[in-house]
Image (tube, rainbow, N blue to C red):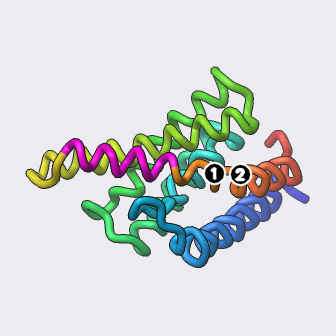
Amino acid sequence: MQPKSYLIFKWIVYALATLLMLAFQSLVLSQIRVMGLTPFLYPVLPAVAAMYEGGRRGPVYALAVGVVCGLLLPEPFPGFFGIAFTLSAVLCARVAERLLAPGLLCGILVSAMSLALTGALRILVQLLTGGGYLELMARIALGETLITLPAVLVVLPLYRVIHKRCAADY
């Protein structure tokens, strides 16, 4: 394949995997309740992709996932998920490039970072708009992060296979 057609194919496969993970969130994870909270897989997807794809392609993917999530989910303000996921992808790519090699430990770390950053930004928006209780919102963000982390074990193998099968140095 030529480089451009190769990249198009690779990102189509990532898009299909993302749709699969969105369906997994909607059909499976949304049925799970732990202390009134459900897992929130969406921030994990750009974090894991950025871990594998790096600081150039990861944030672009994160922005695309953020736009899709913004269309599907209620958000504090228009573009919230796009901003949160892109910032998270930049940080996660840095961790994978400079701190830990991509793999299980790095995947769990970047997923936790992405979930925590998304939760912290939600809290910040609520506080700036004069609503919410800091302690309650922090407990919700922490609980959501903890119950979502086991789901990372579903995302990591899928994205690892895509990254390895579609690997090339273009």
Q: Which residue is mark 1?
A: 150
Q: Which residue is mark 2?
A: 153
Label the magenta part by its dominant secondary structure.
Answer: helix
Classify 153 as above or below 8.
above
Q: Secondary structure at mark 2?
A: helix
On whether residue 56 falls in the magenta region, the answer is no
**Residue 96 % position (x, y):** 65, 31
165 left or right of 50?
right
Mark 2 and mark 1 in contact (Cβ < 8 Å)?
yes
The residue at the far bottom in this view is 27
Residue plotted at (49% across, 59% down) = 40
70 left or right of 150?
left
Q: Looking at the picture, tell me which residue is in the foreground, 39 or 74.
A: 39
Residue plotted at (59% across, 78% down) = 27
- In the rendering, which numbered label is found on residue 25? none
Q: Looking at the picture, tell me which residue is in the foreground, 131 or 100.
A: 131
**Badge 2: how crowded within 10 Å, few (<14), some, or many (20+)?**
few
**Residue 74 % position (x, y):** 33, 70
Residue plotted at (34% across, 51% down) = 140
On whether residue 143 falls in the magenta region, the answer is yes
Q: Name which residue type carries label 2.
A: Leu
**Residue 119 % position (x, y):** 36, 47
Residue plotted at (12% across, 54% down) = 131
Q: Secondary structure at mark 1?
A: helix
Classify 15 as above or below 85.
below
Extent of the magenta region:
134-146
Classify 19 as above or below 128.
below
